[in-house]
Image (cartoon, helix red, strand yellow):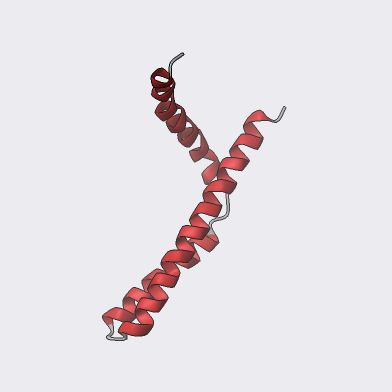
Amino acid sequence: MTWRSRWLWVPPACLAVMALSCGAAAAADKTKVDRATKQVEQGAKQIGQGKVGPGFKEMFTGIGRTIVEGATFSGNTMGEFFRKTFSS
């Protein structure tokens, strides 16, 4: 099999893994992600009220936390899926 033909299998495989992990996503606890998202909202509201400095700080801190917590949540969800799928 050539490298080119191997790369043709990568996107469908990724889509299959993502589609199958959607069922497990509902089972995981995502309160940390929601909390970080609310922090972004609060920062944006502060900017709208004229508190630009603290608003930007709150918003960008929330964006960073959302990225970290979202990645952690996704990793845990995928790990859960593979444990359930391949444990016999």
Drawn side of residue 75 relative to residue 10, left or right: right
Q: Residue furthest front?
A: 2
* Image quadrant where residue 56 sits: bottom left
> From the image, which quarter does the C terminus lie in?
top right
In percent of width and height, residue 1 lies at 46, 13
Q: Residue furthest top?
A: 1
Q: Is residue 51 visible?
A: yes
Camera-side residue of 69 and 21: 69
Residue 64, above or below 45: above
* Image quadrant where residue 80 sits: top right
Residue 66, above or below 74: below
Q: Is residue 37 visible?
A: no
Residue at left offset 52%, top offset 48%: 74
In percent of width and height, residue 59 lies at 38, 72
In percent of width and height, residue 33 lies at 50, 60
Drawn side of residue 82 relative to residue 65, left or right: right
